[in-house]
Image (cartoon, rainbow, N blue to C red):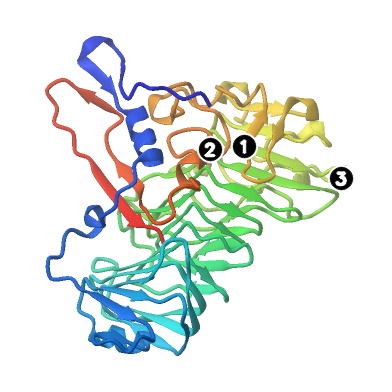
Amino acid sequence: MDGTNSFFKSRCGASKINMKLIKATTMKNIYLILFSLMIGVNLKAADLYVNSSGATGTYTSLTAAVQAANDGDRIIISTLMNLVENVTINKSVTVTSASAGTTFTLNGTMTIEAVANKEIRIIGGDISALSFSSGTATDTTACKFYLVDSQVNTDINANIYGLSFNMLYCEDDDLSVDFKFGSIMGSSLSYFQLSSGSGTAQNDTTYILANKFTSECNINNQDHNYFVANNFFYVPNSRQLYINFSKPSNSGWNNILNNTFARYNSGYNAYSNNLYFANNYDYSNLNLFNNYFLHNNNSSSSQYYNTHIGPSSLTTSHQPVVQYNVFACPNWSSSAGIYWNSNLNSSNYNNYLESTSNYTYSTTDGKITVGANAINKGNPSIQYYDIDMTRNDMGTYGGPYTWENYHDTTSNGRGRVFNLDMPFEIWMGQTPTIKADAVHKK
C-alpha cells in the first residue's frame, strides 16, 4: 500500500476530520520508551538484579528476587546466567532480560498465580514451562499477564477464570495456547483455543490480531466478545477456524475481519472448510467482512466437503453477516461460495474466484499480491479503510489493523504501542478521548 505524509484528511468539508490514518500510522511508527501508557508512573518502583556478581543488592535466583520485590518493581536478569529453578509470581512485577535483543533463560516452571488486580509482564524470556494457578482474581478483578517477545518450550494452558492472558510478538510455531480472555498479537503459533466460560456476557473483547496459525484454531468462549483481524490461517489439511458457542443475552458484536484463510493442499478431506460454525447456535451478532478464503479441495464426491464455510444447518436468523469477502476455489468451481447461506451472492458484495491467475498470496503472511477482486474491494465504510486512506484491501494487509502494524522488525529494545483507541472521526466542538497501551520489547 502506498504511504502518505498527511496525518489528517478532510471529509465532508471543514467540519469533520478523519482520524483513521493517524490511528494506524501511530500504531505502526511511534515507539514509547516508558511504560507510563500502560501502568502509570510508580515513583517507588525499584530495579532488582539477578546475576552472579555477588554485589550488594543483587540476587542469584529469580525466586529470591520475586520474594524481595514489591508491586511495580522490575526484575532484570543477566543473560549470562542459566537459571535452574521453579518460581511462582504473584506480584505486579516486570521480569526482563538485562540487554536489548537478548533473552534470559529459565530451566524450570514459571507459575503465575492469578491474584486480583495484579499485572505481571515477562519480556525476553526463554522458559521451559509456563503454568497458571487460580488466585483471588475474578472476571471483574482480573490478573493481567503479558508474555512479550518470549519463547516457551511447552504448550501453554492459561484456561482459568480471572486471568487476562496477553501474548505479544512471540515466534514459536510449535506452541499452542489455551485461554479464556485477553489477546494474541503479532505472533506466530500452532494454534489458539478460547475455552468455554460461564455463559455470562462480560462486555469486553478478546483480540486476536496479525498472527500466523498453522493448525486448527477454536473459539468456544461465549463470555467475552472476540475481534479476530488480519491473521493468516495457513493450514494444509483441516479447518482453519472452528467456532462453537451460543451467544449470551445482551452481548455485543463479534468480528472476523481482514483475515486470509488458506487450506492449501489439494485432495479430499472431510473437514476442509476454512471456517466452521457448530450447528444450531446463534451467530447473528458476528460480522464476517473483508476476508480472503482459499481452499484447493478437488474432490467431486460431495459439495459439502468443498465449501469454504460450513456446515449446512444454520437457520437464516442464526447466520453471521457475511459481506465483502473473496472465495477462491480453483479446483472446484461449482462450489466456490459457502453451502448453507442461500443469501450469499452478489447482493452481499462477496466475490468468487476459480482461476489461479486471478489471485496470488504470500505464504509467509497471507498478503494478497495479485487479486483484482480483493484490492480496494472490501467494506467501503471509513472504519475499514487502509492506512493509506484507500478502500479496504481484503486479507491480512488491509484495514487499520494491518499486518504491518504488528511486525515491525526495527523495534528491539524500544517501547511499542500495541493498542490505540481513538475515534475514527472528530467533529468540530468535540473533545476526543485517546487511550494507548504500550509495552517494552526485550
Real-space Cα separation, disc 2 to disc 1, in angstroms: 10 Å
Question: What amino acid is labelled 1 in the image?
Answer: Lys
Q: Position of residue 80 (x, y in %)?
A: 47, 78
Q: How many marks?
A: 3
Question: What amino acid is labelled 2 in the image?
Answer: Asn
Direction from residue 14 to residue 440 in the image, left or right: right
Mark found first going from the N terminus, 2 or 3: 2
Q: Position of residue 174 (x, y in %)?
A: 64, 66
Direction from residue 132 to residue 173 in the image, left or right: right
Helix, strand or loop status at disc 1: loop
Q: Please name the residue that numbered disc 1 is placed on.
A: 367
Closer to the eye: label 2 or 3? 2
Real-space Cα separation, disc 1 to disc 3, in angstroms: 27 Å
Badges 2 and 3: C-beta atoms under 8 Å apart?
no
Helix, strand or loop status at disc 3: loop
Q: Please name the residue that numbered disc 3 is placed on.
A: 299
What residue is rendered at 20% in x and 73% in y?
46
